[in-house]
Amino acid sequence: MKRLEIGTSVSEAPGRVDGMLQVGWLPDGYPMEIPVIIVRGRGDGPTVWIHGCVHGNEYCGAFIIHKFMRELDLPRGTVIALPVLNITGFQRQQRMSPFEGYNGGDLNRCFPGKPDGTLTEQMAFHVFRHLRAHATHFIDLHTAFTADTRWALFAPPSGELGAKAEGMARAFGFQNTLPTPLDILGGSALIAAANEGIPGLIVEAGGIGSAFTPETVADGAERLRNVLRHLGMLDGDITAYGDMTFFSNFAWVNATRGGLFRPAVTCGHRIAKGDLVGRYYDAHGDLIEEAKSPFSGVVLAIAGGPVMPNGEILVHVGLDPRAA
Amino acid sequence: METIEIGTAVSTGEGLAKGFLKVGELPDGQAMRIPVVILRGSQNGPVLWLHGCVHGNEYCGTFIIHELIRSLRPQDVVGTVVALPILNITAFERNQRMSPFEGYNGGDLNRCFPGKPNGTLTEQIAHAVYGPLRRHANYLIDFHTALTEDVRWALFANMPGEVGKQGEEIARAFGFRSTLPAPPDILGGSAMMTAAKDGIPAFIVEAGGKGPAFSEEHVQDGAERLRNVMRHLGMLRGAVTDYGKQWHFSNFAWVHATQGGLFQRIVRCGDHVEKGTVIGRYQNLHGQPAGDARAPEPGIVLAIHPGPVMATGETLVHIGLDPREV
């Protein structure tokens, strides 16, 4: 069996190997390291790369990966899992690394990275060089804000590679799914991987911090198993999750007001342009403004509040929903 | 009617007066100020002082106070509600417990009362708030959250005599099932204990969890229980709801985590635990099991760490000790 080495995870035989990959250095001179889990199947097959916590406070994906990997008995192929990419953000319960002193701390806008760039660009480089070298398929686990978030994106959106990505998306089976236009999310691992010929899927399940449930974790692990069944890596019937809703794109709406915020919609809600998405209140409890959706479509993510400045994400809306 | 003046909120008669109370100064020289609402009823009566966000990331109480104020018509009220929905404003802005401007030990505002006019930033905030509180309040209700959405418990200052007796009556009118008659030797420096020692019956509500971990139901429920307290105090007309039996405790155990890592709780607030009951599970960065967290005392779970990650020293669990149903 071909030797597979990622950091201190070295796999030469079927089974599981845990290790660490260095992605930087801390100010005290100790390495900044992230966990790597390799599970090698007994026979040949695809190599699925799964990672989570690109954004440090998006913990649900780490728990999904952990549960999935603990329960994985793999006949064919390889799974490479990096449950926590942005380890220092993870430690501080924040999106971006507390050690990033310069612009561009969003790790998911830094791929493929630079060996001599900013802290976050270097993290991206050290992860992506292994992803590019080994992965035949890629899955990136994210959360949005609230516990009810459930949507996915696949790339490329079309062509032969797009068909493979769509197959993964259908096997994962979140109803609200975006075939991702290649001109958005530049610098994301998804688009960087697509540019290298690796079909990929982003999963948005649950919310930031503790805003996710054990049910979401278990459901995510099961859907990952279904993707592996679809890829022929696991035996068993492939669950057909049914019809999906595809979009042309998604609108990323930043709040232009700040204050105490109460959402008026939940994820999956269909809205029309001008519909109420939430209300802002001031410190005395008086209503400042009703926030309206600038777009029609499906609510994919909604700010959880309870307080936010302007510039925060107010809502993500899936545009031009169509049955698919 | 006498004038009630708190910062720039000036009430001279029936109605709503809104303003700000200065509690400090920011590095750019601007005032650090907090919102004040005075809701004056049609007749003189008790002054009920409500405040929230003593800890900046405990937002539920702010929303409960706002909901109560919005639900009241001054002409229906006897007495006055003085509401300071956000005490630790700079911590509130940053979604953290203590002020980001507090550079010294003792940033927990609820351990600084009555405060000092020339102390640390947080001691000065306490001083600015406590002066008006002591001058005006007949009753204090202080809103907190604990850790998770299912938190629902309360404490009253169990002083000897009328202060403790009236505190218990407020606790019954608010009606949370798990309620601690707090011994006077705990929570020193809290607004509750400080006010109680100055003769003001005082009550803490712990409803919901940090940050966004509370729901519209908490807010509506909290506002309704406050109205019930007001009915009990004769500040609103209407029958006082009897919320039924409560669990009272001798004290509560504040347990710090001595293990860190990825954590998932397995108990809910209100669960009975024995010494040694597993309350949560740790896993390491590779997802491998890394140990169990166990209750060090028997009692009722009042608060439990939500995960998903925890450093040592964080609050693991609050347990109500020696529960007795009364």
Image (cartoon, coloured by chain):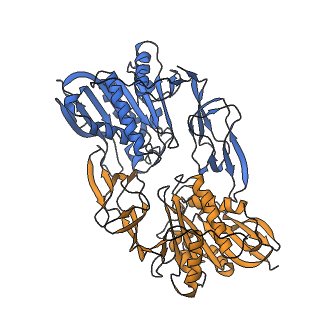
Chain colours: A orange, B blue
Identify the residue at the far top of this view.
B161
* Number of numbered tags placed on the structure image: 0
Q: Is residue A113 visible?
A: no
Identified at 40% across, 24% down, the residue is B173
Picture quarter with the N terminus of chain B:
top left
Give the percent coordinates (x, y) of residue A250: 41, 72
Q: Is residue A4 above or below residue B164?
A: below
Give the percent coordinates (x, y) of residue B220: 37, 39
Give the percent coordinates (x, y) of residue A188: 52, 75
The residue nearer to you, when weighing B216 against B166, is: B216
Q: Is residue B117 above or below residue A92?
A: above
Identify the residue at the far bottom of this view.
A159
| Quadrant assignment, res B265 | top right
| Quadrant assignment, res A200 | bottom right
Q: Is residue B250 above or below residue B279?
A: above
| Quadrant assignment, res B16 | top left
Q: Is residue B18 visible?
A: yes
Q: Is residue B154 above or below residue A176?
A: above
Judge left or right: residue A199 versus residue B202: right
Judge left or right: residue A44 versus residue B55: right
Identified at 64% across, 68% down, the residue is A226
The residue nearer to you, when weighing A71 against B94, is: A71
Give the percent coordinates (x, y) of residue A81: 67, 68
Identified at 70% across, 66% down, the residue is A36
Identified at 49% across, 23% down, the residue is B245
The residue nearer to you, when weighing B156 against B244, is: B244
